[in-house]
Image (cartoon, grey):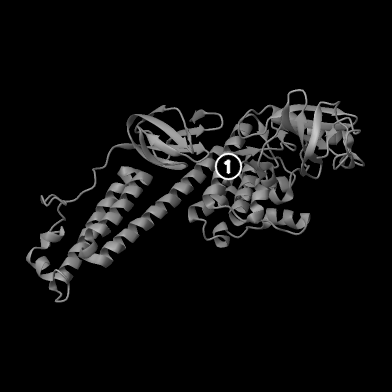
Amino acid sequence: MTRTVIGDHTAGSAPARPVRPPSGRYEFLDVLGEGAMGIVYRARDLELHRIVAVKTISPDAIHGADATAVIRRLYQEATAAARLTHPGIVTIYDVNAATGVPYVVMEYVKGRTLADLLVAGPLPPDKAAHVVVQVCHALQYAHGQGVVHRDVKSSNIMVDDAWHVKLTDFGVARVIDNQSAQTGVMVGTPAYMSPEQARGAEVDARSDLFSLGVVLYEALVGERPFPGDSVATVLDEVLRLEPLPVRERNVAVSPALDAVVRRAMCKEPRDRYPDAAAFADALTHALAVDHRRVAVAALRRGMRTARRHGTALLFGGFGVAALAVAAFVVLIGEDSAHGLATAVSRDVAAAAVAASHDRATSPTGPGASAAAANPSAVGVQADGPAPDPAGQGRPLAVPPAVRAGCLSVNAVPFATVHVDGRQVGDTPRACLRIGRGRHRLHFESLNERSPEHVIVVDEKHTSDNPLRVSYDFRTHQFLAR
């Protein structure tokens, strides 16, 4: 491997572009990536004995340009990012300049950019949403610190093997409370710009949400929504074009998720989500709607099975439907599922009664005489509700509805949710129906388990105002709102 120490080009050959920042503290290992303004190297910190990423501005980029402005831009990146301490944001370790070459030393993230992952095609909808929810959390924190990223794009989102996400490159970030920032200057990457950025107008946190909406569109489709072949064409599309709905380009995307993308990419900032937390909540809710849709489909399949096979498979058909009902209860809670489950029980019983009658009057049906003589032998009554399997004459019924509240849960990475020692679902979930009162909650992901967290669910925790609990397995911390 080529071995080059920054500031000492005598050992080995020079890196891809000659740079001469600091003394001999950092040893270049290889190039991680190149952008319009700089190069990012993987390097070794010889003093602290750790692997870092070193971003430099190449002499070619500075040559012929306003060097002072270029250096100021890099310092701006470091100043903005240094204010941010969050597990979803790359940490800045050092910033300096030497021999006319500025550099920033930052945390090395092992993984690939989202742009690299999308070379193979779009992500499954739940994976795409999982990535974007994590970016939302990072942006919510940054915006709370007064920092707008201004260049959110797939190549600035790092994803590791466990699908942990880090947002990098605050190189064009604008510190909101820094009133020296000039307006009328277009900054960012055209294909991901918000319309107000494209016009060179003043921007706020909602501009980042538009850009993240573009990222979500790209992750779900595998292509950008504004694919113009020139900067002018792309900017015109950003300003005027409504891209094809995600669902029209990928049938695996649900209507609920499609609606989230549309709102995030509204041309007017006031029509987008008010903040990144609302964007994340909308994505979580959309995934929950998808889960419900899958459960309903399973319910209907169970009902069709019961009707098709009649008495011969009454208990088998009912078992399929019962399993589907159980899954549905886990997904949306007993309160919401009670009415549907009761209806399903009634429909399955009715189907069995009809099938029993058909078979009893059919001269060819096996067991027809027995069924005709004793309809209750097959577990139903010809008139009235179905008795329990023990034949005591009590109607089958689901548990009565309980007083419940709404719990919104999320974890990084995906995790199962356990309440009072019982698994009740998976993350993310917008509204997990939990009985009111005190409960012990923990998350499990792969071979890890979070500590137990005491929650109190009450009547104020509705679907519009759920109790929100999140856990980050990277920092081993609960985040409750």
Provide the secondary structure element on which disc 1 rests. loop
Going by the numbered disc 1, the residue's amino acid type is Trp
Report the side of 191 relative to 253 (left or right): right
Q: Measuring 49% from the left and 29% from the top, which residue is drawn there?
A: 478
Q: Nearer the viewer, residue 218 or 175?
A: 218
**In the image, is residue 392 above or below residue 25?**
below
Estimate the x, y position of residue 453 in percent, counting from the top left.
42, 27
Q: Nearer the viewer, residue 107 or 339?
A: 107
* Residue 273 in sight from this viewpoint: no
Q: How many marks?
A: 1
Q: Residue at x 63, y 33 (%)?
A: 143
The x and y percentages for residue 164 are: 58, 39
* Crowding at mark 1 (Cα within 10 Å: few <14, some 14-19, many 20+): some
* Residue annotated with mark 1: 163
Q: Residue furthest left?
A: 373
Left or right side of 140 for 311: left
Residue found farthest to the front: 1
Can see residue 430?
Answer: yes
Percent position of residue 57, x then y: 83, 37
Q: Is residue 243 above or below residue 165?
A: below
Image quadrant containing the N terminus: top right
Answer with the quarter of the image where residue 60 lies: top right
Q: Residue 300 at what x, y percent from top left?
A: 33, 59
Going 24% across and 62% down the picture, which residue do you hit?
313
